[in-house]
Amino acid sequence: MYLLDVVDRFIDHLRAQVTVGKKFVSTTEPPASGNDFEVYYSETLNGTTNVLFSSDDFQGLYIGHNMMNSLFTTDKFYIEESQNILNKQMAISSIISVVNEKQRNIYFSGIKRMVDSYRQKIKTELFVQ
């Protein structure tokens, strides 16, 4: 059950970050400024795993290729198209960081229930045999 305990702690920390809208290390306090963290909830199922990042000097996109590999690109056109798609998804989604506490609670409660159901399933299957 150790792994599920770690997942539980991760979910709790993620929820704490979303609540204040700041990224921070789990054993520290949220920063007063910087490290902004926006999280959106959408009921649309997105089957891709893409990570788009940008800084003042650089942009890149990691694209989930399969379960074990990812592709990386710095192609400006592809990144721009990916950003446009992401912006459209965010426009029809609900922001749950800082605001929208009710939706945030529903979202994280659902994740916790899923972890608890796996925990119960593991206990049941381990002790039945």
Image (cartoon, rainbow, N blue to C red):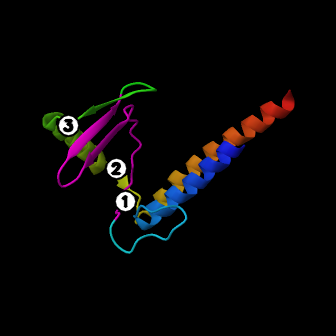
* Residue under pointer 3: 74
| Residue 46 on the magenta segment | yes
Quote the CA–CA distance across marks 3 and 2.
27 Å
Residue assigned mark 1: 37
* Residue at disc 3, secondary structure: loop
Residue 1 picture location, percent across and down: 72, 43
Asked whether disc 3 touches disc 2, contact meaning CB atoms under 8 Å apart, the reply is: no
Specify few, some or many for label 2: CA neighbours under 10 Å numbering under 14, 14-19, or 20 or more.
some
At horizontal 49% and vertical 71% (from top left) the residue drawn is 29
- Whichever of callouts 1 and 2 sits on the residue coming sooner in the sequence is 1
What residue type is disc 2 on? Ser
The mark nearer the N terminus, 1 or 3, is 1
Residue 76 lies, in percent from the top left, at: 14, 38
Badge 3 or badge 2: first in the primary sequence: 3
In this rendering, the label closer to the viewer, 3 or 2: 3
**Whether label 1 touches label 2, CB < 8 Å:** no
Q: Amino acid at mark 1?
A: Phe
The residue at 73%/36% (across/down) is 121
Which x, y percent locates residue 41? 40, 50
Q: Residue furthest top?
A: 66
Residue 46 versus residue 72: which sits nearer the camera? 72
Q: Are marks 1 and 3 in contact (CB under 8 Å)?
A: no
In this picture, which residue range is highlighted in magenta? 35-64
User: Which image quadrant for residue 116?
Assistant: top right
For residue 93, which numbered disc appears in the image? 2
Query: What is the secondary structure assignment of the residue under circle 1?
Result: loop
Q: Residue at x 61, y 43 (%)?
A: 114
